[in-house]
Image (tube, rainbow, N blue to C red):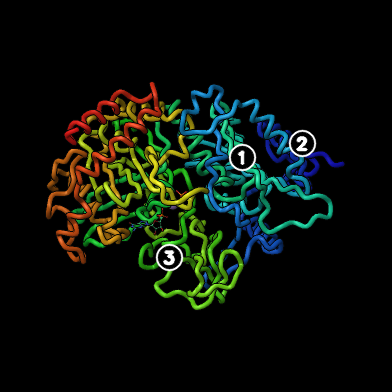
Amino acid sequence: MTTIADRQVQDSGHSAPTTHAKLAQWVEEVAALTKPDRVYWVDGSQEENDRLTAQLVEAGTLIKLNEEKFPGSFAAFSDPSDVARVEEQTYICSVNERDAGFTNNWMEPNEMKAKLNGLFDGAMRGRTMYVIPFIMGHLDAEDPKFGVEITDSEYVVASMRIMARIGTDVLRKLEEKQSFFVPALHSVGAPLEAGQADVPWPCNPEKWIVHFPEERSIVSYGSGYGGNALLGKKCFALRIASVVARDEGWLAEHMLILKLTSPEGKDYHVAAAFPSACGKTNLALLDPTIEGWKVETLGDDIAWMRVGANGELRAVNPEAGLFGVAPGTGWSTNPNAMRAIEKGNSVFTNVALTDDGGVWWEGMTDETPAHLTDWLGNDWTPESDRPAAHPNSRFCTPIAQIDMLSDEYNDPQGVKIDAILFGGRRKTTVPLVTQARSWTSGVFMGSTLSSETTAAAAGQVGLVRRDPMAMLPFIGYDAGDYLNHWDSIRSHLAEDQLPQIFLVNWFRRTSEGGFAWPGFGENSRVLKWAIERLEGKADAVDTPIGFVPAAGSLDIKGLDLSEDEVAEATHVDVDEWCAELPGIEEWFARFGDSLPASLRTELDELTARLGR
Ligand SMILES: Nc1nc2c(ncn2[C@@H]2O[C@H](COP(=O)(O)OP(=O)(O)O)[C@@H](O)[C@H]2O)c(=O)[nH]1
Ligand SMILES: C=C(OP(=O)(O)O)C(=O)O
Ligand SMILES: [Mn+2]
């Protein structure tokens, strides 16, 4: 039998894969446990990617798309059971149960490790074990945040290469100071016995997505789906990073970042938190419909925000790619995303295939193709009663392909945030836009944010649930401590640098059932109002929940919407809000002692303003 070191020499060409002692040791241990046929150190090169994707095409996991239409791009089709994040199987294994809080599943760390050791024993048999050095954020950040993902999935390697900075440069930087890295272990949990044929999408019916917050480590078993398997994203950059951020005095948030330039040439930066599949990628790539206003993208999913030298909140996007919801992303709704996708170098998952080797999903074009192969591999026509693409189908595309990417994306210092939006998907109650009266009142809006569940997570769709700061599935510690942390950030920010906080809802319905607001590019009008509020220019009505646009203050020039319809989108219905109060009381009760007193006060004051 060859030793692990021999296998590394044989398969990667590196005579000494790493001089990082801890990393070498961890890789050795994992290989001894999981018993792969080969260990391969990922260098991140184009040549390597070509080789791995060719291998995946050979295996039937990837389909090479029409080179002219989608250069260097592939489609993958998952096992029909492995299409979304599995929140029921996601665990925060802190030493004390209390520290995981009521929003997380918890198991005692040693008990979990014993279970995982059993599952990982021989889990990579017959497969290659890939070692992917990666970094979330910039290589030249003041305090770079490294991770290393070990995986037995080539699909994960190809996707991680898009989503994060990976490979040899990262490894060398990691070695320089023998820096700390987050060990992130992933297996699809489908070992191959000698002679056993592989399937296109190996996975295991049993899934575990596990975080050890004190150790800052991640173990993921059984799933190949992005949110469960690309461990730099939700697992590291949100769950583990939120814990690091608490300890180091910053915020790791589920937020897009955009830059807005007014007709006068003044720049503003906005961060916005919406739950999964509630509009982050679309807002980040927004094409403004109002004259003179310009939007540039910095990030579409995750913001790491620190307090800057002048007491300002500064945000960076730690990712390098988009992992966007495909359905609803189209030429009329999100042309900027479409242009980025068309440049190629993308991996699509669970979309439909056109007959000429392209991809399609609901909402991509105004016209529906006459024939498609749906995500399950069946013939599909417009008469079919099922969607052609899975509702949580995704495109995975390098962020650098966005034409409107801001230069500031490359600045490790990040950008100063002027406004924070919290938003959800609510048919009723929540108006188009509401400005918070104060930072604390804004934190209250975030803490009570509610949204209907979507296809991004397994389970029923359309149920209203509380989703604090759109972080419900991603807070890596006690939710009350998390709100206290938000509350405490206030004291580090300078009074004149405080971002203004807004609550938005693009998904309110009219009495006829349609969307009350056209959304997408038209959301630029809401951004304009928010900026004019910062500048003290736009008028607002003081309502029990906060400031909403006064009649005429929202720019609706050129929009096919009457003042009455705008009023329907923006009005605050006191009865609806009174009906909302018991749910908020119930929600806050779940925090027990860890609810910040300031938020309790906010709720009492809201209740009083509503006349209850
Ligand atoms: N009606 C409406 N739908 C939207 C809007 N923005 C996004 N969506 C839809 O919401 C879904 C998720 O959007 P996306 O931006 O990918 O959400 P993310 O997961 O938060 O990044 C897609 O189907 C979009 O078409 C909007 O302003 N109005
Ligand atoms: C990446 C995901 O989230 P989002 O829908 O926020 O992009 C996910 O849910 O796996
Ligand atoms: Mn998104």
* Camera-nearest residue between 39 and 371: 371
**Residue 157 locus on image (x, y percent):** 62, 50
Please rate how many residues cluster around mark 1, counting C-alpha atoms within 10 Å: few if below 14, some from 14 to 19, many from 20.
many
Q: Which residue is mark 3?
A: 339
Select label 2 or label 1 by which is in front: 1
Distance of label 2 from label 1 (alpha carbons): 21 Å
- The residue located at (45%, 74%) in the rendering is 368
Q: Which residue is mark 1?
A: 208
Q: Are marks 2 and 1 in contact (CB under 8 Å)?
A: no
Secondary structure under the numbered disc 3 in the rendered image = helix
The residue that disc 2 covers is 32
Which structural element holds mark 1?
A: strand
Tell me residue 472's x, y (percent). Answer: 43, 38
User: Are there few (<14), some (14-19), or many (20+) residues within 10 Å of tag 2?
Assistant: some
Question: Does residue 342 appear left or right of residue 578 in this picture?
Answer: right
**Residue shown at 21% from the left, 30% from the top:** 605
> Where the N terminus falls, by quadrant?
top right
* Ligand 2 lies under 8 Å from the Cβ of mark 2: no
Q: Give the alpha-carbon distance from disc 3 to disc 1, as whole Å.
A: 36 Å
Q: Amino acid at mark 2?
A: Ala
The quarter of the displayed image where residue 64 is located: bottom right
* Residue 151, visible in the rendered structure: no
Q: Nearer the viewer, residue 263 or 558?
A: 558
Identify which residue, 243 or 77, lies in the foreground: 77
Secondary element under disc 2, as helix, strand or loop, is helix
Residue in the image at 52% along x and 48% along y: 458
